[in-house]
Image (cartoon, grey):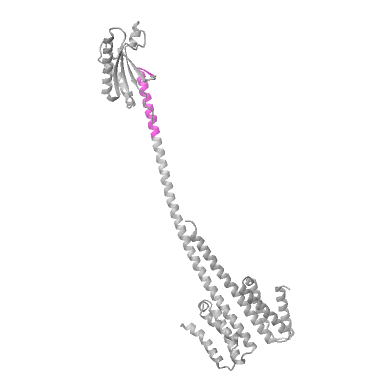
């Protein structure tokens, strides 16, 4: 199962459990984790090693949260969603930081090109 | 230390102090979270990512509170884990803001370089335009000079042609290998047996002198000729005297003295039959020979 499908199934599973009253994971907590993971993925976090690692942690935490929710452990599940959200947000930040560093490199290259252009 | 940094450190120190009072040692995750927060507060995030740093502070406070309330349990570990991520996240956004600032500075420097380059290019273009204008002016001046020279040459040729045409009306003019030969009849120039120029001869010789003025650099030879009547010596003396009279007149009227010579040929080179009066009249003559011009170098 690919990553989006896995995430979707986790989300649906979590919502189903919440809806059934098997666990007390706030829906907003689940949605926040899912949104953070999706943002990190769409921003290209997988292209930066450090960001990709934290995205991976986030996905693992999300899976564990869903498992705990299914088992009826509402509080630990909610905490795992918080961890997933924190790791996903960190992945997003690290990806953007890497992009900012590349922008510096690009700007310096452009400056050198201008300085070395024949006059 | 600024007020802001003091404000940031107060909750950290307070929580650290409280944790010191707890019975259990803080878990490694909490220690790591504290270290991450401390590192972040000393970095760019302190000024460039204050919102994210405040979130990290709140997360750390929550972890510290959990540790105080429940000790080293799983939620404390989870909250510490989250707090550390929040600090790292704040540090990353601080670095992003710093990088954006750097990019802006580099791009501003590049813009300045481009302005300098553009100014130099504009200046060089202006100089090139000035040079082109100057060269065009020189070309135009040269063309004017060439046209003036051409007109002067045309006028000179016209003048020379007119002078020659005028001369043809009073003398015979022909081209020979030795040069331009102008032949004046002796009866027009001199009385019989005399070497003094007649008044009408001076008028005609004046026209010859005017024509020779256009040939100042060429050598001129004045040759006197007689018919065959009389002795040879008499004829040679008379022909020389007549040639010298013509030469003197021409020198007086502008021909350079060092470019002209006089020669008495006598009856040695007749051009007609000395047996008839008409032939003898033709033989009595003065020839003015203008040597060909030296080829231009």
- The magenta segment: B149-174
Q: Note whether residue B222 is visible.
A: yes
Pinpoint residue A113: horizontal percent, then vertical percent. Answer: 51, 61
Is residue B173 one of those drawn in magenta? Answer: yes
The relative height of residue B140 versus residue A36 in the rendered view (above or below) is: above
**Quadrant that contains the C terminus of chain B:** top left
Task: Give left or right: position of B284 versus A118.
Answer: left
Depth order, front residue of A52/B160: A52
**Residue at 26%, 18% in the rendered image:** B244
Residue B118 at x, y percent in the picture: 47, 58
Task: Determine if the magenta segment contains residue B100.
Answer: no
Which quadrant of the structure image shows residue A17?
A: bottom right
Q: Can you give x and y, in whole percent of width and height, for residue B99 in the image?
A: 53, 71
The secondary structure making up most of the magenta span is: helix
Image quadrant assignment for residue B294 = top left
Picture residue at 65% right of the left edge, 88% below the top: B74
Measured as percent of width and height from the top left, residue A99 is found at 58, 70
């Amino acid at each position: 199962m690919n990553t989006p499908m896995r995430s979707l199934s986790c989300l649906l599973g979590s919502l189903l459990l919440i809806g059934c009253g098997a666990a007390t994971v706030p829906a907003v907590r689940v949605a926040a984790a899912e949104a953070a993971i999706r943002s990190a993925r769409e921003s290209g976090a997988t292209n930066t090693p450090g960001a990709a690692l934290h995205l991976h942690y986030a996905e693992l935490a999300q899976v564990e949260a869903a498992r705990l929710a299914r088992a009826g452990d509402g509080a630990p599940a909610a905490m795992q969603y918080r961890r997933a959200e924190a790791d996903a947000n960190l992945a997003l930040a690290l990806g953007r930081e890497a992009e900012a560093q590349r922008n510096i490199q690009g700007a310096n290259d452009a400056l050198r090109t201008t300085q070395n252009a024949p006059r | 230390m600024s007020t802001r940094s003091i404000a940031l450190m107060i909750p950290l120190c307070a929580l650290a102090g409280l944790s010191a009072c707890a019975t259990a040692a803080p878990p490694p995750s909490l220690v790591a979270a504290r270290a991450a927060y401390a590192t972040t507060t000393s970095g760019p995030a302190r000024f460039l990512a204050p919102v994210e740093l405040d979130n990290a502070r709140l997360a750390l406070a929550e972890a510290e509170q959990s540790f105080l309330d429940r000790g080293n349990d799983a939620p404390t570990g989870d909250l510490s884990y989250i707090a550390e991520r929040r600090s790292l996240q704040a540090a990353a956004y601080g670095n992003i803001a710093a990088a954006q600032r750097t990019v802006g500075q580099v791009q501003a420097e590049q813009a300045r370089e481009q302005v300098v380059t553009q100014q130099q290019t504009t200046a060089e273009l202006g100089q090139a335009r000035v040079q082109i204008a100057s060269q065009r002016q020189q070309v135009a001046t040269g063309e004017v000079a060439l046209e003036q020279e051409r007109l002067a040459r045309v006028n000179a040729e016209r003048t020379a042609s007119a002078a020659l045409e005028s001369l043809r009306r009073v003398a015979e003019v022909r081209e020979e290998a030795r040069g331009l030969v102008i032949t004046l009849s002796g009866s027009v120039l001199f009385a019989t047996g005399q070497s003094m120029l007649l008044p009408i001869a001076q008028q005609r010789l004046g026209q010859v002198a005017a024509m020779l003025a256009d040939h100042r650099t060429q050598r001129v030879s004045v040759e006197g000729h007689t018919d065959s009547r009389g002795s040879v010596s008499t004829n040679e003396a008379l022909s020389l005297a007549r040639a010298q009279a013509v030469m003197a007149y021409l020198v007086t009227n502008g021909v350079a003295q060092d470019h002209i010579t006089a020669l008495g040929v006598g009856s040695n080179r007749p051009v007609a039959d000395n047996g008839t009066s008409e032939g003898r009249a033709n033989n009595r003559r003065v020839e003015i020979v203008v040597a060909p011009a030296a080829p231009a170098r």
